[in-house]
Amino acid sequence: MPEISRFYGIIIGMFFNEHNPPHFHVKYEEYNAEITIKDGIVTGRLPRRALNLVFEWLDMHRDELLENWKRGENCESFIKIEPLK
């Protein structure tokens, strides 16, 4: 999975040519989740604290995530997104 951001042990990534709706993947320790970009629907499991951090990051970078989604559809390289600080 190409990594687009990493913060507090949380790894955010996307795959090329993925299924809709636009989403990204999250890995944290032994947990994995998929989160839709537009409405934040979570599939999988993350600890509450990690999930809250991911939602905070999502709110800040939604447009960049959607741009990366378009890049992935065209098999273009993803742009790294600023981590949560």
Image (cartoon, rainbow, N blue to C red):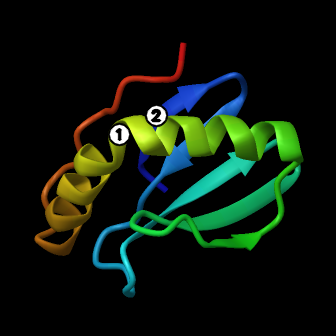
- Marks 2/1 in contact by CB < 8 Å: the verdict is yes
- When the figure is inspected, residue 54 is found, relative to residue 65, above or below; the finding is above
**Looking at the image, which residue is at 53% across and 45% down?**
12
| Mark 1 residue crowding within 10 angstroms, few (<14) / some (14–19) / many (20+) | some
Of residues 15 and 36, the one nearer the viewer is 36
> Residue 30, image x and y in percent?
88, 50
- When the figure is inspected, residue 59 is found, relative to residue 33, above or below; the finding is above
Q: CA distance from mark 2 to mark 1?
A: 11 Å
Using the image, tell me which numbered label, if any, was put on residue 5.
2
| Mark 2 residue crowding within 10 angstroms, few (<14) / some (14–19) / many (20+) | some
Query: Which residue is outermost to the bottom?
Result: 19
> Residue 51, image x and y in percent?
74, 47
Q: Quadrant of residue 33?
A: bottom right
Mark sitting earlier along the chain (2/1): 2
**Looking at the image, which residue is at 56% across and 36% down?**
56
Image quadrant in which the C terminus is located: top right
Secondary structure beneath dot 2 equals strand
- When the figure is inspected, residue 17 is found, relative to residue 26, above or below; the finding is below
Q: Which residue is mark 1?
A: 61
Q: Quadrant of residue 66?
A: bottom left
Q: Nearer the viewer, mark 2 or mark 1?
A: 1
- When the figure is inspected, residue 16 is found, relative to residue 8, above or below; the finding is below
Q: Amino acid at mark 2?
A: Ser
Q: Quadrant of residue 40?
A: bottom right
**Looking at the image, which residue is at 70% across and 49% down?**
27
Of residues 38 and 22, the one nearer the viewer is 38
Q: How many marks?
A: 2
